Amino acid sequence: MNKPSRIITVANQKGGVGKTTTAINLATALAAIGECVLIVDLDPQGNASTGLGIDRQARLVSSYDVLTGSASVKESAMETVVPGLSIIPSTLDLLGIEMEISSAPDRVLKLRRALREVTGGIPFSYVLIDCPPSLNLLTLNAMAAADSVLVPLQCEFFALEGLSQLLQTVEQIRGSINPALTIQGIVLTMFDRRNNLANQVVEDVRAHMGDTVYETVIPRNVRVSEAPSYGKPAILYDLKCSGSQAYLQLASEVIRRERRLRAA
């Protein structure tokens, strides 16, 4: 019997904060240090799927099929170019999922039940769920299914705007659907050390959120931005670049936090 997977939702309702980049590179870093990892792409744009080299024509079964119950997690998971990393890809069908399942009494629990109903346990030590940039039914499904939420936060002036809304949503999910849900951590992304404002944002976020913020800060990095156009995570595209090295450090920090959470 496999031990239960640790399910981490990567979420921020604000777009352009490095959410998908964080999901695919963190998953790759976890796989690189020996973990067996699954990404569930819940964003209709499908950027996580594209960034891992999954051609749109190859996405015959997707996260849409998992949510509607027409395919299982095992049937939907595809291997990627990264050893030890699989993905349940996304398709544009997800754009219509709210209309399709909104009247179902278990509409927020679709993903949780799909992940739990795998015979013999899910053969992954970590499941990362990449959410769309909104607090919609897809994001609620991801939070209902997760053990914890990881929040990428861009180092810009309005970084803290909207964070309170996201944290409030987590509290609502914890109070009504998933009492075990925790904040895994907040990761600061797109940091430019030459920018005084970015340094001030880091200080402000740490002052407001304390130890919830990871020590690792993800720098703004050209190689990280280039990697998705080659269908590769940055860690495969250029292991030595500063962005790749930061994601490897973040993976180690995530594992340390998960061990503390399990021990608590």
Image (cartoon, rainbow, N blue to C red):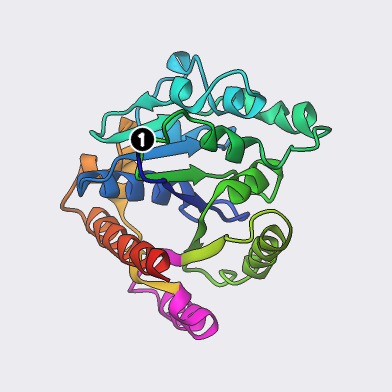
Q: How far across and down, in percent of the image, does residue 117 sit?
A: 54, 32
Q: Main secondary structure of the magenta part?
A: helix
User: Which stretch appears magenta?
Assistant: 186-212
Residue at left 57%, top 32%?
114
Indicate yes or no whether the magenta region holds residue 1: no
Q: Amino acid at mark 1?
A: Pro
Q: Which residue is mark 1?
A: 123
Residue at left 42%, top 26%?
77
Q: Residues within 10 Å of mark 1 (few under 14, many from 20)?
A: some
Residue at left 55%, top 28%?
63
Indicate yes or no whether the magenta region holds residue 211: yes
Q: How far across and down, in percent of the image, does residue 260 sit?
A: 37, 69
Q: How far across and down, in percent of the image, does residue 23 sit?
A: 42, 47
Q: Residue furthest front?
A: 1
Q: Is residue 209 above or below residue 104?
A: below
Q: Is residue 32 above or below residue 45?
A: below
Q: Is residue 133 visible?
A: no
Residue at left 66%, top 70%?
164
Q: Residue furthest left?
A: 240
Q: Is residue 167 above or below residue 81?
A: below
The quarter holding residue 226 reads top left
Q: Is residue 54 left or right of residue 10?
A: left
